[in-house]
Image (cartoon, coloured by chain):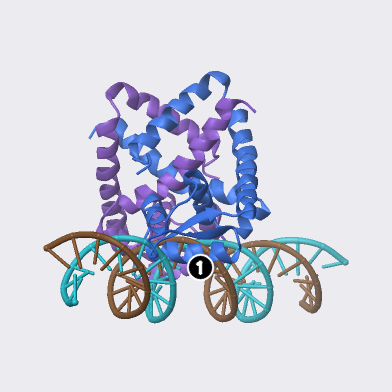
Chain colours: A purple, B blue, C cyan, D brown
Amino acid sequence: MDERIKEAVDLFQEVMFYGTERVIRAVDNPLWNEYSPEQIQTLKLISKEGKITSSRLALLQSVHKSAISSRIKKLLQKELIRIVQTEDRREKLLELTESGKDVLEQSDKVLMEYLGKLLSDQVNDKEIEQFLLFFRKLKEIIKMDGV
Amino acid sequence: MDERIKEAVDLFQEVMFYGTERVIRAVDNPLWNEYSPEQIQTLKLISKEGKITSSRLALLQSVHKSAISSRIKKLLQKELIRIVQTEDRREKLLELTESGKDVLEQSDKVLMEYLGKLLSDQVNDKEIEQFLLFFRKLKEIIKMDGV
DNA sequence: CCATAAAGTATACCCCCTAAACTATTAACT
DNA sequence: AGTTAATAGTTTAGGGGGTATACTTTATGG
């Protein structure tokens, strides 16, 4: 295999697998102690789709439905989401409550400040364009589009 | 804030936080069912440093020492690592056993095949150079160098 | 020589995940 | 229509991840 591919894989592993964890822990904000990254992501997905079912969440997060089930339970207890019944009485559509929207908004703000500073401190104007290209390509590669 | 920084942060979040998880779950190999990503990473770090203490592992993985303690316990039970006593009888140096080296080697191979294919399928020869540049830059940004 | 610091361990408590069993409801097929 | 199969979710058991705190053992430094 190409040496450069090999290096890319190493870097991919190092940066994506382990670096991400470090960044998440470095974001020091009360919000992140109160809600887990997975919970926040769930809010984000619900917000993005407006209303969503558990099964679709499981699909989007690549996770077993029982994992979603317990997550939903916690979000309901915290009153960040609510259930909307549909005609099909097996399924439950989920949507954000006002408080859920607030939490999501705050979380976005915190992250934007942290990462924004990180990026603007270390990436100059010329590089930022290439960064965007890179991230878009990366997203494409790991097939994250809508699922 | 610059609109492009904003987009970069969004992509960063999406790709790094959530995309990584998806990739990890997509790597379908018995090895990954037997050993957790954290355990593998621990093996990798031990291998990289030859011998290492728990405290240094905690530092490198940005994790509380008690988390390392339990991880080490599991790796010892699986006989992937062993303890080497030093003069300072408080500390325990850790090193890989033969079996630990095997596991690490296999895991690297599996990952290399999976990610290697992903990359070489979707990134052409010209792009790969830029990929390397940006992974290196990314690594720098999230301050992962040696700690 | 004693107080303080450092390396690890143990425990309690939380989150995340899977697999398998189970309920309820709807779709499908003979 | 009536029975069978599929689908949406929940629950439970079991294992991994993490934190904080208290505690032991061993060094270090006044």
Circle 1 crowding by C-alpha within 10 Å: few under 14, some 14–19, many from 20: some
Could you tell me residue B59's position as x and y percent? 36, 53
Residue A129 falls left or right of residue A121: right
Q: Is residue A40 visible?
A: yes
Q: Position of residue A47 (x, y in %)?
A: 39, 53
- Looking at the rendered image, the quarter that the N terminus of chain A falls into is top right
- Name the residue: 35% across, 47% down: A23
**Element type at marker 1?**
helix
Q: Residue at x 47, y 66 (%)?
A: B70
Q: Quadrant of the C terminus of chain A?
A: top right
Q: Quadrant of residue B31?
A: bottom right
Measured along the vertical axis of the image, is residue B20 above or below residue B125? below
Left or right of A115 in this view: B105: right
- Chain letter for mark 1, please: A
Identify which residue is drawn at 28% across, 25% down: A124
Q: What residue is disc 1 on? A: A69
Above/below status of A55 relative to B11: below
Which is nearer the eye, C13 or B107? B107
Amino acid on which disc 1 is placed? Ser
Q: Position of residue A110 (x, y in %)?
A: 26, 49
Task: Name the residue at 32% across, 55% down.
Answer: A104
Q: Residue lying furthest top in this view? A: B126
In the image, is B51 to the left or to the right of C23? left
- B93 in relation to B20, above or below: below
**Is residue A84 visible in the rendered structure shown here?**
no
Quarter holding residue A40: bottom left
